[in-house]
Amino acid sequence: MVFYRENRFFCGFLMAWLLFFSLLRTLQHFSFDTNALDLSLFDYAISSTLKGQALAEPFHGYGWGSLLAIHFTPTLFFLAPFYLIWQGPLFLLHLQVLAVGLAAVPLYLLAREELEGKRPALVIAVSYLLFRPLINGMMYDFHPEMFFPLFIFSGHYFLTVRKNNFLFFLFILLALFIKEDFAIYVFFYCLWLLHAGEQRKTALKAAFLCAVYAGLAFALFIPHFRQQIHASSAYEFLSRWESYGNNFWQIARHGLLHPIRLLHDVKWLTNLPYLANYFLPLMLIPLLDPAILLILPPLAIGWLSRIPLMSSFGLYYGAALVPFLFLALLRALAKQRQRKGKDAAREKTKWAWGLNLLLILSLVNFKWNLLAPAKYRNIRFYPAVRDCLKRIPAQAALAAQSALIPHVSKRRAITMLPETAGAEYILFHMGMNPWPLDRDRLRALDGRLQRSPDYRCLCRTGALRLYRKIMI
């Protein structure tokens, strides 16, 4: 209550922000703008954990196998107990909003300490909450990567301001548990703490912990779970690095010893324009502090990806950049504030105008199209879809469109179109996002099923289709 009384405007803005985006995520979900990949994927994985199957899910094409074979994300285990109270896609969507929003609290406290005032701290926190790349990631299904700003800001606050090593290590561990590659980013963050002179012994221990964890994740845990799904024990996302070596350590060694080749391979000139949306709203200020170098490890890994969205840091792929951008922004502004010019009044005016411009740019660059009613027009299909779903027995084998799967009750036998093998029921809507199919292929599927003597159409409401296989 003391914090609320002293920071009422910040708390009020944060509460309004949380309510606003929770409402938008609910509308988004019931407008069928969420998907099996990557929402039901995590929903099934966490639910399966409560049944004794470690993060088992059916959407990666290897049957029911652990998600840990694809990405080592132990942070999902911590969400399983909450599924005893409330489980399902909406829980994950709202949890993601809460995690992204709460990260503004330690950032605000850091800014208040670094910039010595509530007003500049409020501008930094609001700029974070309106940061377009962050909102892009938050509004796309569910991804543990979106927890990263909360863990980094919290760990940094407890280390540098509160001098609480225990809570620092707790948040560092939580950051490591997000996904295997985040151990690399946190390792370099800890090395930077060493360089910055922040609690050097603690930072050294944390860096060692990150190195050990990364080694175990890549060399032991992921191969173990990949063997369980009868796949190659090699980490599949290292395929881009085959010419560097056969395992994580060989690749890391080769990259460090041949930095020129690494710079050539990442094609940084081609991908550099994509970073404009990260730096321009912050007026390029983060580039004025060495902490900006912390974005280089995620940049190198992202730019070497074969996935266009990852190499351009679209959607949630920029989550690894966001906390380091804002830490560099804070440090650069703190240095600017400490400058003592000949004309103190002029320096104060420049500082005030700089903060105002930062806030204005954040408002201008906000994702205003989220307010467009057209984004949620598919909500009108929900009653028909709900009635159609009642015709599908709870345990029946189902193949469904990705956008519809989050609305289907969980079942053991479920596949995502275009896969239909073994399905008793096939469900799709030609007016919704057809991914990973296109609309022509979806119409072709409808025509093929309509002509087939093996299937009977149970539902033909507008563009909604439900087919049942005729058992002989």
Image (cartoon, rainbow, N blue to C red):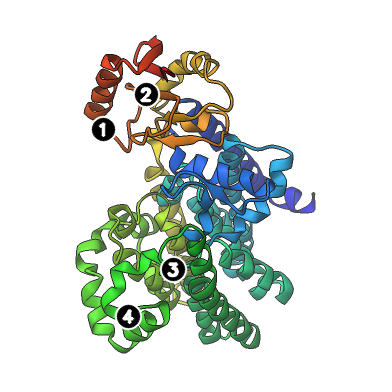
C-alpha span from label 3 to label 2: 46 Å
Q: Which residue is mark 3?
A: 233
Indicate whether 267 appears above or below 418: below
C-alpha span from label 4 to label 2: 49 Å
Indicate whether 243 appears above or below 111: below
C-alpha span from label 2 to label 1: 21 Å
State which tag comes first along the sequence, 4 or 3: 3
State which tag comes first along the sequence, 2 or 1: 2
**Observer-nearest residue: 17 or 269?**
269
State which tag comes first along the sequence, 4 or 1: 4
C-alpha span from label 4 to label 1: 38 Å
Coordinates of residue 229 in the picture (x, y in percent): 48, 57
Looking at numbered disc 2 in the image, what kind of residue is underneath it? Ala
The residue carrying pointer 4 sits among few (fewer than 14), some (14 to 19) or many (20 or more) residues within 10 Å by Cα, namely some
Coordinates of residue 330 in the picture (x, y in percent): 51, 67
Helix, strand or loop for disc 4:
loop
Looking at numbered disc 4 in the image, what kind of residue is underneath it? Gly
- Are the residues flagged by discs 3 and 2 in contact, CB closer than 8 Å? no
Residue for point 51% across, 78% down: 215
Helix, strand or loop for disc 2:
helix
Q: Which residue is mark 2?
A: 374
- Are the residues flagged by discs 4 and 3 in contact, CB closer than 8 Å? no
Q: Which residue is mark 4?
A: 245
Nearer to us: label 2 or label 1:
1
Residue 338 makes an appearance in the image: no
Indicate whether 85 appears above or below 247: above
Looking at numbered disc 3 in the image, what kind of residue is underneath it? Ser
User: Which residue is situated farthest in the front direction here?
Assistant: 472
Q: Which residue is mark 1?
A: 438
The residue carrying pointer 1 sits among few (fewer than 14), some (14 to 19) or many (20 or more) residues within 10 Å by Cα, namely few
